[in-house]
Amino acid sequence: MNKISKVMALLVVLTFVTGVFAGCAGEKEDVETPAATEKQIDDNTTKEAEPVTLRISTMFGGTDPSTQVFEEQLVAFEELHPHVTIKNESMTSVGDEYRTKVKTDFATGNEADITFFYNGADVQGIINSDKVISYDEINEKYPEVGKDITDGVKDSVREEDGKLYMMPLTGFYEGLFVNEAIFEQYGLELPTTWENLITAIDVLKENDIVPFAGPIAQSHYMIEHFVLSQAGAEGHKDVLAGDEPSADWVAAFNNIKDLYEKEAFAKDALTMDIEMAQNLFIQEKAAMILEGSWFIGRCEDELKDKMTVIPMATASDKMDPTSIIGGFSSGYYVSKSSYEDPAKQQAVIDLVSFLTSAEAIKDHAAVNGGSPAAKVVVEGLHPLFVEGHAMVANANTLNMPIDSRLTPEAFNILVKDGIPFIVEGRKNPEEVLKATKEKNER
């Protein structure tokens, strides 16, 4: 869709949304009375809006695939709402700088009016400080906010208190990306079982192909998948539950150690970072990589044509073979102080509604390949994207990443002070898990 078409499409969406919200601006009785609704629309149409400036902070900056889409959406919104000026404070999410900035802004009362941020453990302190308003409360006055996002998605991102604080756009999934062409070349079955995986590792090594592009020094995705593969969905959720480390988690980390000793990874895997591992797979020097849906965007179509994505092979009968890591880990939050500001409330509601419309979500899904939070059809996707969406649709369990239930500092114990030492036999899984638990409880 070119920019003009996109603006026209957004005009249609906004016309609908504005009409609905205008009808919702009065008391509830007015919403249910057609005559009153028409009068409210007429009042809002003829009243000249006061100028207002809104600040928005997102992760759609730098080389993020959604950056251009997001910036075009802001331009389209300002064209439709000339009284609103938007200060875009977005930046890249690479590293911890954005995470730190958002937490600092909320802690010092400098938060943006609308913030795109993570859920789970990352946002818990912000929620506890009463700095963001729940959409449950917003929907009491503006029931149409977030109307295009499915109820199932909304329920999946409710926080521990049962409330809905963020509106997601696209979800993600992680899985085992396989170069099928290499597997076919050596007559290998896809690694859908642990036995197939071990056989593939042996054959690939004999033919000087790196089986796994696995960055031991940045083993985020490996930790997720090996734990899920061994412990299953329920065991994967039980992050550090109980007084003693989970036997399944210990076995999962030992599985990584076993494959390391079996030379399933590159020789420099111990010092390799995620980007280096991706390059190894992209250059077709490695046959498998555990990655997220965003990884597809880094691959040329010629490589995509050779690839497939499947769930991690099961290491025990506790894992449902369709289970994957996935979900919705970020979305739009509304500042409570901004919502309660009479001069800003309507503009904030209009903007967050605009940015969470079906059309806006579809545009993001088209460029980042994520699973849309609304029921939209994304045309023109490469078949590999479609395979990924089908894997999500067929999954009996979608499991949020472990780091969504641990503090960043605790998860770093696993990644930086854990797996690299375990594979070399310098630490055992039990002591790493105990250290992680202690850090998480501080």
Image: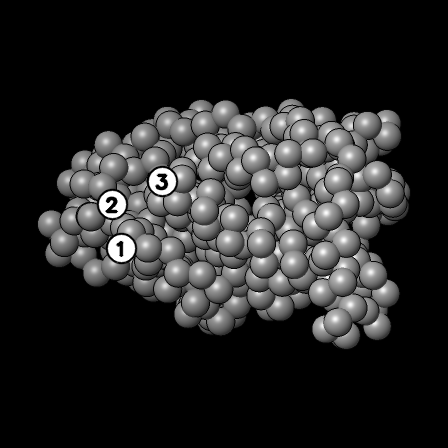
Q: Decide: marks 1, 2 in contact (CB < 8 A)? A: yes
Q: Residue at x 69, y 34 (%)?
A: 84
| Residue 175 pos. (x, y %) | 41, 53
For marks 2 and 3 on the same chain, the one whose residue lies earlier in the sequence = 3
Q: Is residue 199 visible?
A: yes
Q: How far is the residue under mark 2 from the one under mark 3? A: 25 Å
- Quadrant in the picture for residue 334: top right
- Quadrant in the picture for residue 40: bottom right
Q: For label 3, count other residues whose C-alpha is less than 10 Å away and answer few (under 14), some (14-19) or many (20+).
A: few
Q: Is the N terminus in the top left, top right, bottom left or bottom right quadrant?
A: top left
Q: Which residue is mark 3?
A: 2
Q: Amino acid at mark 2?
A: Lys
Q: Residue at x 44, y 36 (%)?
A: 65
| Residue 333 pos. (x, y %) | 71, 45
Q: Which residue is mark 2?
A: 304
Q: Residue at x 58, y 51 (%)?
A: 14
Q: Is the C terminus in the top left, top right, bottom left or bottom right quadrant?
A: top right
Q: Which residue is mark 1?
A: 383
The mark closer to the camera, 1 or 2, is: 1
* Disc number for residue 254: none
| Residue 292 pos. (x, y %) | 44, 46
| Residue 50 pos. (x, y %) | 78, 35
In this image, 177 relative to 419: left or right? left
Q: Decide: marks 1, 3 in contact (CB < 8 A)? A: no
